Image (tube, rainbow, N blue to C red):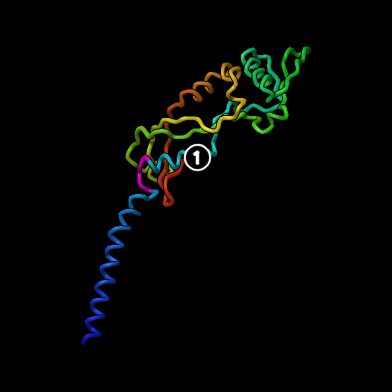
Amino acid sequence: MIPDLVRTKTAKAGAFIAAAFIAIVLPVVGCNSKTKPTPANFTQVLNSYFLEHPECLFSGVRFPYATSDPDMTKQLNTLVKSKMLESSYESSVHTTRYTVAPAGSRYAPRFCYGHRTISTIDSFTPPAKGATGFPETHVAYHYTIQDTPVWAKSPDVLAAFPEMASALANGGSGQATLAQTLAGWQVPE
């Protein structure tokens, strides 16, 4: 009879411990779910995305690059002064030809100057089935630019590229659509 009493008390204690574990751990795991529509989850997903998608001066420009456009020449000449590019004037066609300097080879051809880091999630829509077939939300956010190389901080380059200068000084705002998958939120591409 005593062994049955011990077994019963042990079973009750085990059940109590299991119930306490479930009561404590389950809400914590549920609150930290990557699939919940929370600003923390959106921030994490967007920061990971922007690490792989930096901000750049150019898209679609290939070097060597020749131009006679005075505005583009002015901008590219600041990169020559910063030793990112080399230039030569071709008088027969009245253009300046730009090639990548050794110091610029790491950044060419897009000349990326950092990546967005989310500072705030300003708003988001309730998740609803979207074009991807998954629930989607539209997120509005503010960001700063991080990991800016030294050449992009030179006064000449900042003056020649005012959009970049503004983004570096003030950050900016943006919007993104995020899709909810079984693995969590993602930026559809």
Q: Residue 24 sits in which quadrant?
A: bottom left
Q: Nearer the viewer, residue 9 or 136?
A: 9
Q: Is residue 93 left or right of residue 58?
A: right
Find residue 42 and report its horizontal and vertical position in percent: 40, 40
86 lies above or below 34: above
Please state, as top left, top right, bottom left or bottom right, where the N terminus lies in the image: bottom left
Residue drawn at the location 23% of the way across and 78% of the way down: 8
In the figure, 52 relative to 100: above or below? below
Q: Nearer the viewer, residue 57 or 22?
A: 22
Q: Is residue 160 magenta?
A: no
Residue drawn 65% across and 19% down? 76
Q: Which residues are magenta?
A: 35-39
Res 10 quadrant in image: bottom left
Dot 1 amino acid type: Tyr
Q: Is residue 73 left or right of residue 165?
A: right
Where in the figure is residue 151, as x and y percent of width and height?
A: 62, 25
In percent of width and height, residue 106 lies at: 66, 33
Q: Residue at x 22, y 81 (%)?
A: 5
Q: Is residue 159 left or right of residue 2?
A: right
Residue 37, horizontal then vertical, whole percent:
35, 43
Name the residue tied to disc 1.
49
Residue found at the very far bottom of the displayed protein: 1
The residue most toward the right is 92
Vertically, is 126 above or below 30? above
Residue 11 vertical position relative to residue 147 in the rendered view, above or below? below
Q: Is residue 38 covered in magenta?
A: yes
Residue in front for this viewpoint, 17 or 128: 17
In depth, the one of 4 and 161 nearer the eye is 4
